[in-house]
Amino acid sequence: MFVCDQLNLKILDANDIAISKLQYRKKELLGKSLSSLGKNIDLSQEDLDELDLPFIETWKIFSKTKQEIYVQFSSHLINYKGTPAKIVIAHDITEVFRKKLLSKKAVSLPIGFRDFPLAEIEWDLKHKILRWSKRAELLFGYSHSDVNKNPFLLEDLIADSDLVKITEANKNAIEDQIPTKVISLKNETKNGKVIECEWYNSYLFDRKGHITSVYSVIKDITEEKQAQEKSKQLMTSFMDLYNSITDAIYLLNSSGIIIDVNDGLTRTFGYEKKEVLGKEIKFLSASGKFSQNQIDEYIQRAKNGDSISYEGWGEKKNGEVFPTEVLMNSGSYLNEDVIIVVERDVSERLLSHQALKQRESMFSNLFHSSPIGIAQLDHHHEIVNVNHSFEEIFGYSEKEVKGLELDKLIVPCDEYKDALELSNSEIAKVYTGKRRTKSGNTVDVIVCAVPVIVDERLISTYGIYVDITERKKAEEKLKSNLREKEVLLAEIHHRVKNNLAVITSILELQSMNTENVEAQNVLLDSQMRVRSIALVHELLYKSDDFSKVNIPNYLKDLARVISNSLERKSVSVEIDFNLDQVELKITQAIPCGLILNEVLTNSYKHAFTGRAEGKILVSFKNADTGMIYKITDDGIGLPKPKENEKASLGMTLVKTLGKQLNAETTISSENGTSFEFRFSKK
């Protein structure tokens, strides 16, 4: 342990342990500079963590016999024999430090005060920095090396506008012999950031009363200033909110005198703020409608912590008297106990109340005269009242059902669970079911449960009932007739399909009994055409909808039948499909099937002559302009028609079927044959 001079760190005294460790005699140490014993070793935070050492300066000093000793210094300011001094404690860490070999170049730094949480700077009246702590380096960004290169860095650190404060403080300290002074200064860090700091300056005087140095402890108050500014902004926002409230707000002191008002008072009463301050509360009350004793009682109760609400009468500056609602509560204003009074003009509310009564009367008339049965329930689902139509539907009078639980009264047992869910719903729901009348009969009804929620609380529920018994009977009769027609229509399709199957069989027998090849081909073509029609009726018979044909299923099934009937072993034909989900009426589906029959038959017979395989694409797309039906093969194409040659029966049929569809028909024969039909869906 050493006692050193404050300014130059010359050793003024040393304890026995220091003398023993350094192997000097005491008189040899006295007068030596502490920094002459060794040098600072610059360690990183990682090194200190690894060595488990605190974040303070580490030094390597030498004994008289040149023995290396590793120490960490901590220091404190003292007054030694009337002279500013420091007591410096050297903590021996030699054993710990030798466990790790460091290859870093040591940098010599003066002893600082790294064990102190605030930045510390020592400087003279010429603004020359004498001491620079590690905390100062962390706060301002300037290293010891920066300070050594520029000892007058203080003038860069302190904003020009604040240097005057420093000079003035130093002058006052000399004149008045003031030992300490706190100054707020704006400082600029090395990276250009401006921060606001409080400098706690201690002035060190010599025996003649001259300042030898200024010891400054510095605290960053930037965040505090920002917090103060934010608090100021919040206060401004509060005042803006206070004055934006449309109700009149005024504060009364303990004597009932108005000491502050918001802008809402001017809007409500017409008085400016200065006209009201210092007045009693009766100044704002209507003449002849003010009771001093009553108001005094309210004020006393408010002082005792009660929240007071009453209806009063105000008088505006122009003499107009109007009804008000007044709230009184105790509060605090600038550390003074006050009564906070909020007074609201309720003129419009009274008018609204009259309008509300009219609406209630209209609703009551609507409720009781409505042709639909209505029951009003409380939050326990008990009947409050019912209208005349409810009485007619269920046979109960209002007197008989009032106070009873509605669902238990009229809901059959098998529907009670559904009815309870309907009654407990927080949103309006509609349900169709049966309800029980007073006589024990059941009626079919449409039930609508309408909850009435105010302030997120269910206050009532309306059960609305429409008797649909007669309508249900009519619906059942209609459904019965419809089922009969569906059965009849299915039977018709079945019989048509069977009759067409008979015709197909006759054509097949006729083909087998003729030896004329041309006749056989004609009969086969006719047979395929009949099959195309029969397949439609077969699909309709199997369908739930007897009026529409599913086109993708129909074309795929028909193509498979045609392919199985015509494909020869010498030619392998691959049929691809590109079909949208489209349903057509039978009057359009049959022409589409016959077209596919004619085109596929022609392709199988003529398109792939001399080839072992071929491809056909069947496309049916639902476009914005209508249906696009297209059949394309990659065969040899259509032969060029000879002069005066009549079109074949198949080609004539294709064009005729296109006209039946009211289609725009396009036939091309480039790179194969393409038939395209564009038509509108019925």
Image: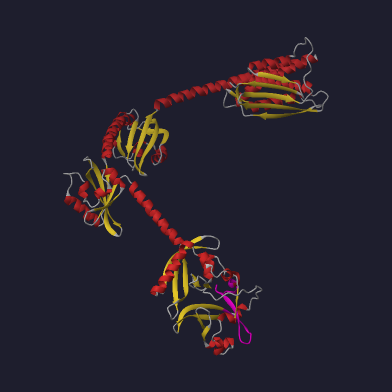
Rendering colour mode = secondary structure
- Looking at the image, which residue sits at the far top? 644
Instruction: Pick the residue in front: 439 or 148.
Output: 148
Q: Quadrant of residue 29?
A: bottom right
Instruction: Pick the residue in front: 624 or 350.
Output: 350
Q: Is residue 50 magenta?
A: yes
Residue 422, compared with residue 129, is above or below; it is above
Residue 75, compared with residue 537, is above or below; it is below
Q: Position of residue 17 (x, y in %)?
A: 54, 87
- The residues colored magenta run 48-71
The reply, left or right, for residue 628 in relation to residue 514 is left
Residue 28, compared with residue 456, is above or below; it is below
Viewport quadrant of the C terminus: top right
Q: Position of residue 548 (x, y in %)?
A: 59, 24
- Image point (38%, 33%), residue name: 435
- Image point (59%, 81%), residue name: 36
Q: Position of residue 163 (x, y in %)?
A: 47, 65
Q: Quadrant of residue 55?
A: bottom right
Q: Quadrant of residue 621?
A: top right
Residue 442, visible in the rendered structure: no
The reply, left or right, for residue 242 in relation to residue 593 is left
Residue 646, visible in the rendered structure: yes
Instruction: Pick the residue in front: 503 or 421.
Output: 421
Q: Is residue 494 magenta?
A: no
- Looking at the image, which residue sits at the far right? 610
Residue 621, compared with residue 245, is above or below; it is above
The reply, left or right, for residue 142 in relation to residue 409 is right
Q: Position of residue 306 (x, y in %)?
A: 25, 54
